[in-house]
Image: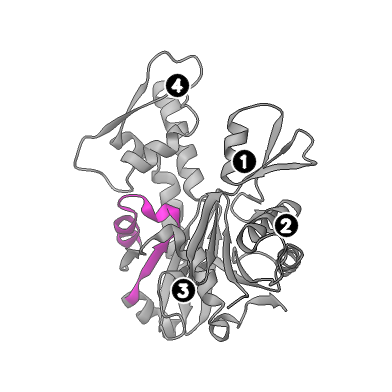
């Protein structure tokens, strides 16, 4: 097959690209480095992160802001770069591309993203809502399920949907995700210790000792404090767990709100099948147990949750009859 089928999950912090027959071929920061005026792109993805880390007169640009706000010019440039890396510069055989979007994105915004994807070199461009792509990537039989909830925990937002027989019955999206947890950790430690954290240390705390539920073990981690600090800051797992309770409560409330929106005819099925968690935030320890206790339904974490949306976008290209209702595409 000469025409490649490509699925792209362009998120707030990370971009993943899935190619049919090859799997996830790219997992890099959703970041571009430009010159000081933003006129010339110097690097994209991991190369941009490395360039920006060296300092100098460079500018960081993220195509996706605050979870679902999109800089369409930047997104077009990044898509062009990504497609070029996958299919080569000559692009004799242009690819079919499926791109995931937040469910709350407007029709005008969807059309703009589609046009940017076509201009970036796609032969055919489609959009799919992130929760639907996440469900497909999590191996949920979306065409036949009688009801299930999907919660995609991204860096900038959490997107949720109730799905039955190939349709989204109810959706919700909140601008709370992994980045909000990092900010909550930073703020809590600043209040408690009167010290700021070094760059990236809040995320390290979250990943290494963070948990949504209390931990039986008294673990701790020494992290770099901010400017002016002479010694590392020792932080306990209990401090991190307490720090992230407020944003986690907001996510739980969104799940409860979504459950209440499920039509009566599907509520019993949804309560039986429960929810599947996808996205990088699903890797937080105890998150499934935390949400299950608050929503009163079974909750499980998908296998390889961070890749589910990207994999689902690629798989959806082979199942257009399943996802075409309510989706958007250009040929």
Q: Position of residue 177 (x, y in %)?
A: 49, 50
N-term mark: 1 or 2: 1
Report helix, strand or loop for mark 3.
helix
Q: CA distance from mark 3 to mark 1?
A: 31 Å
Seen in the image, is 104 located left or right of residue 203? Answer: right
Residue with the mark numbered 4: 195
- Nearest to the observer: residue 6 or residue 151: 6
Q: Position of residue 120 (x, y in %)?
A: 73, 62
Q: Which residues are magenta?
A: 273-294
In the rendered image, which residue does mark 2 sit on?
A: 76
Q: Nearer the viewer, residue 142 or 124?
A: 124
**Image quarter (top left, top right, bottom left or bottom right) of the C terminus:** bottom right
On screen, residue 205 above or below 274: above
How many other residues sit within 10 Å of disc 3, few (<14), some (14-19) or many (≥20)?
A: many
Indicate the quadrant where residue 260 lies. Answer: bottom left
- Work out how far the residue at label 3 is from the one at label 2, CA to CA, in angstroms: 26 Å
Q: Earlier in the sequence, mark 4 or mark 1?
A: 1
Give the residue drawn at x 57%, y 77%: 317
| N-terminal-most mark, 4 or 3 | 3
Instruction: Point out the tag, 2 or 4, that comes first from the N-terminus.
Output: 2
Q: Which residue is mark 1?
A: 48
Looking at the rendered structure, which numbered label has been put on residue 136? 3
- Residues under numbered marks 4 and 3 in contact, where contact means CB atoms less than 8 Å apart: no
Q: How many marks?
A: 4
Of residues 230 and 180, the one nearer the viewer is 230
Marks 1 and 2: CB-CB under 8 Å? no
Residue 31 shows up from this direction = yes
The picture places residue 294, in percent across and down from the top left corner, at 34, 59
Distance from the alpha carbon under mark 1 to that under mark 2: 16 Å
Q: Nearer the viewer, mark 3 or mark 2?
A: 2
Observer-side mark, 2 or 4, equals 2
- Front of the two marks 3 and 1: 1
């Amino acid at each position: 097959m000469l025409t490649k089928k490509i699925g792209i999950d362009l998120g707030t912090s990370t971009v993943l690209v899935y190619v049919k027959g090859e799997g996830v071929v790219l997992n890099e920061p959703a970041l571009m480095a430009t010159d000081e005026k933003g006129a010339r792109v110097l690097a994209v993805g991991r190369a941009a992160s490395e360039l920006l880390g060296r300092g100098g007169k460079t500018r960081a640009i993220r195509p996706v802001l605050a979870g679902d706000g999109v800089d369409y010019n930047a997104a077009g440039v990044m898509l062009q770069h990504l497609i070029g890396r996958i299919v080569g510069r000559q692009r004799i055989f242009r690819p079919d591309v499926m791109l995931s979007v937040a469910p709350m994105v407007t029709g005008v915004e969807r059309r703009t993203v589609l046009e940017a994807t076509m201009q970036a070199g796609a032969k055919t461009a489609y959009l799919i809502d992130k929760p639907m792509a996440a469900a497909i990537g999590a191996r949920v039989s979306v065409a036949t399920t009688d009801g299930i909830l999907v919660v995609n925990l991204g860096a900038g937002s959490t997107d949720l949907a109730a799905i039955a027989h190939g349709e989204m019955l109810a959706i919700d999206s909140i601008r709370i995700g992994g980045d909000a947890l990092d900010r909550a950790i930073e703020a809590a430690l600043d209040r408690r210790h009167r010290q700021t954290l070094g760059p990236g240390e809040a995320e390290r705390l979250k990943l290494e000792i963070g948990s949504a539920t209390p931990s039986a073990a008294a673990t701790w981690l020494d992290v770099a404090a901010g400017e002016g600090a002479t010694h590392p800051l020792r932080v306990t797992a209990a401090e991190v767990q307490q720090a992230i309770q407020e944003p986690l409560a907001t996510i739980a409330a969104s799940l409860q709100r979504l459950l209440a929106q499920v039509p009566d005819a599907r509520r019993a099925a949804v309560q039986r099948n429960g929810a599947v968690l996808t996205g990088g935030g699903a890797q937080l320890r105890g998150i499934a147990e935390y949400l299950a206790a608050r929503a009163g339904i079974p909750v499980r974490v998908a296998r390889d949750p961070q890749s589910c949306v990207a994999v689902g976008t690629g798989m959806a290209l082979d199942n257009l009859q399943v996802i075409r209702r309510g989706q958007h595409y250009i040929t």
